[in-house]
Image (tube, rainbow, N blue to C red):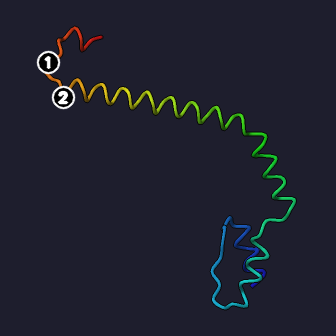
Amino acid sequence: MRNDTKEAISLGFEGKYAISPRQVGIINDLFTPQPAEIERMRKYAEANEEADRRRKELADARNEADSLIYNTEKLLKDLGDKVTASEKVQ
């Protein structure tokens, strides 16, 4: 079971089924990240925090712009002839 679980980890699996309760401990031990791995991931997250924040701000701005465009086009469509052609161009 231990070798089978190690192979699953090496292939990129993030979990494994256990048929017997005796297998749970082995699977849990091997899939639980070690302190060094947790620290490496924490440092990686901290190093990329600013870039992640900028990407989120950009995505939020794009979503807001898309929403504004969609709502404006919908409003113009709903108003139909009540809006002049010159107002629609603006």
Which residue reaches farthest left? 81
Q: Relative to 9, is 57 on the left or the right?
A: left
Q: Estimate the x, y position of residue 34 in percent, counting from the top left.
A: 84, 65
Q: CA distance from mark 1 to mark 2?
A: 9 Å
Q: Estimate the x, y position of residue 50 in percent, counting from the top left.
A: 71, 34
Q: Looking at the picture, which amino acid does disc 1 mark? A: Lys
Q: Estimate the x, y position of residue 9 in percent, counting from the top left.
A: 72, 69
Q: Using the image, determine if residue 65 lies above or below residue 7.
A: above
Q: Please name whichever residue, 3 or 86, is drawn nearer the observer in this view of the structure.
A: 86
Q: Using the image, determine if residue 10 lies above or below residue 58.
A: below
From the image, tell me which residue sits under label 1. 82
Query: Who's the residue at 20% across and 27% down the image?
Result: 77
How many neighbours does mark 1 have within 10 angstroms: few (below 14), some (14-19), or many (20 or more)? few
Query: Who's the residue at 82% across and 47% down the image?
Result: 43
Query: Who's the residue at 24% across and 14% down the image?
Result: 88
Check the picture and name the quadrant holding the N terminus: bottom right
Which residue reaches farthest right? 36
Q: Please name whichever residue, 15 or 90, is drawn nearer the observer in this view of the structure.
A: 90
Q: Relative to 77, is 57 on the left or the right?
A: right
Q: Quadrant of residue 5?
A: bottom right
Q: Quadrant of residue 74?
A: top left
